[in-house]
Image (cartoon, grey):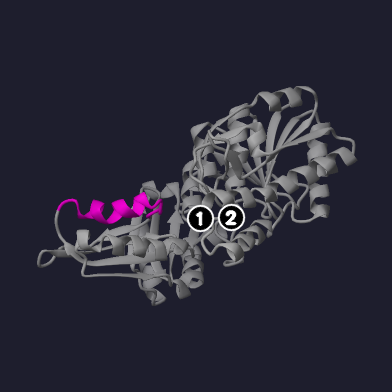
């Protein structure tokens, strides 16, 4: 008998029939003697509908009120799933994030979990109930509803598993595991049996949509055993995210290729080449709560330098506005942006023990006439920014160049 936290994404609960299927799956685990806590997303498409409604009222919706609105999507799902379980004879109880309570900070639309009260959940589990918790949401210290950002239900599931010291956290989605890259882009992509937390964290942060980055961080921090499975297949082991590399076999050089279309580049041209200029540029951007990814500062000439960095595409306009407001302070000759770019990354712990990985990547792209605009590296990843029209071509040729279609 184990304590298992299961998380079901929007496509897994996209219709009432699919919710009934989830209920049958949960009931099967319960019948095997396991204690089950379920975290769920809103039904697929619901969050987008709610955001669209808000934007019909306010072009830039008030963050606090937007959280109030979008959090209702998960509330519908938890009630329906509890009903579906009761209908087949399984006692269940549903909770919103505020009822649990999942305490967060007050950063509306991108809040971070600070504490989870597990008392009520443990009492219900002891009474033989299945506990269903709304993903993606919580409350701050003042009782305001908060949401955790896109994909936040993954983080809820992992955080619940950490708080309850669960034996395993199972993330059910519309794919049956973690693949070497998106099979919709590369049909030859292979499912990985295992992947290290380190690699998964890089894959998630670089654009792989299987798991939210923060959920992987949370799992690594609290040593939560994590498994990705398909909610549409009865059988299958999915992909286990492990804490250690498999020492029994040599790791492939590259485990996967991630990509992200949600990138925009900002160029700050002709700023004084002096100490502190990077802070003067990026400080106001950070104060506006805008994430900065890749950064390049060119070699200074004639006392000036050019500074480029990437931000999420939706934040491009706001970031430029912030910089224009500080233009006199940073003395920039020009500020411009480009949202027709994308980021392509190769990831693998095997890079630590193999040379020539970067040159293989750059040669492969050059042979296809793909120009690299920016480069960023770490011990187990290399990322490049290229024109977005080359995204799928770049992913396909790199997948082949590193032999990922041959991994079984």
Most distant residue in the front direction: 57
SS of the residue at dot 1?
strand
Q: x, y percentage for residue 203? A: 49, 52
Q: Nearer the viewer, residue 407 or 265?
A: 265
Residue 189 lies in the magenta-colored region: no
Q: Which residue is mark 2?
A: 179
Name the quarter where the N terminus is drawn: top right
Q: CA distance from mark 2 to mark 1?
A: 7 Å
Q: Nearer the viewer, residue 347 or 117?
A: 117
Residue at position x 65%, y 30% in the image: 167
SS of the residue at dot 2?
loop
- The secondary structure making up most of the magenta span is helix
Residue 290 lies in the magenta-colored region: yes
- Segment tinted magenta in the rendering: 275-292
Residue at position x 78%, y 39% in the image: 26
The reply, left or right, for residue 99 in relation to residue 155 is right
Q: Are marks 2 and 1 in contact (CB under 8 Å)?
A: yes
Q: x, y percentage for residue 222? A: 52, 31
Quadrant for residue 120, please give it: top right
Sooner in the amino-acid sequence: mark 2 or mark 1:
2
Q: Identify the mark at residue 256; answer none if there is no mark.
A: 1
Is residue 236 in view? no
Q: x, y percentage for residue 232? A: 75, 53
Q: Residues within 10 Å of mark 2 (few under 14, many from 20)?
A: many
């Amino acid at each position: 008998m184990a304590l298992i936290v299961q998380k079901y994404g929007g496509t897994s609960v996209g219709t009432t029939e699919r919710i009934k299927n989830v209920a049958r799956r949960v009931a099967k685990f319960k019948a095997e003697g396991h204690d089950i806590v379920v975290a769920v997303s809103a039904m697929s498409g619901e969050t987008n509908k709610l955001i669209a409604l808000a934007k019909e009222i306010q072009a830039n919706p008030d963050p606090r009120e937007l959280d109030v609105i979008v959090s209702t999507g998960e509330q519908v799902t938890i009630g329906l799933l509890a009903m579906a379980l009761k209908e087949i004879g399984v006692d269940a109880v549903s909770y919103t994030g505020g009822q649990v309570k999942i305490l967060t900070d007050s950063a509306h639309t991108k809040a971070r979990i600070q504490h989870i009260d597990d008392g009520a959940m443990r009492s219900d589990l002891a009474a033989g109930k299945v506990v269903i918790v709304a993903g993606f949401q919580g409350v701050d210290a003042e009782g305001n509803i908060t949401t955790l950002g896109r994909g936040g239900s993954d983080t809820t599931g992992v955080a619940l598993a950490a708080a309850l010291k669960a034996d395993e956290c199972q993330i059910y989605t519309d794919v049956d595991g973690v693949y070497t890259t998106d099979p919709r882009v590369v049909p030859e992509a292979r499912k990985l049996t295992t992947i290290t937390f380190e690699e998964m964290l890089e894959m998630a942060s670089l654009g792989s949509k299987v798991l939210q980055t923060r959920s992987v961080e949370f799992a690594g921090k609290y040593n939560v055993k994590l498994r990705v499975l398909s909610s549409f297949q009865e059988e299958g082991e999915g992909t286990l995210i492990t804490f250690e590399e498999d020492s029994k076999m040599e790791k492939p050089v590259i485990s996967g290729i991630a990509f992200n279309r949600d990138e925009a580049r900002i160029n700050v041209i002709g700023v004084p080449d002096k100490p502190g200029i990077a802070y003067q540029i990026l400080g106001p951007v950070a104060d506006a709560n805008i994430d900065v990814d890749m950064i390049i500062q060119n070699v200074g000439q004639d006392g000036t330098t050019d500074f480029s960095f990437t931000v999420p595409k939706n934040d491009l306009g706001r970031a430029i506005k912030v910089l224009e407001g500080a233009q006199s302070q940073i003395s920039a000759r020009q500020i411009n942006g480009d949202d027709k770019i994308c980021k392509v990354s190769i990831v693998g712990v095997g890079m630590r023990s193999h040379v020539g990985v970067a040159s293989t990547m750059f040669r492969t792209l050059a042979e296809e006439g793909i120009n690299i605009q920016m480069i960023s590296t770490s011990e187990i990843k290399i990322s490049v920014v290229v024109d977005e029209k080359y995204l799928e071509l770049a992913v396909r040729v790199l997948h082949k160049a590193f032999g990922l279609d041959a991994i079984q």
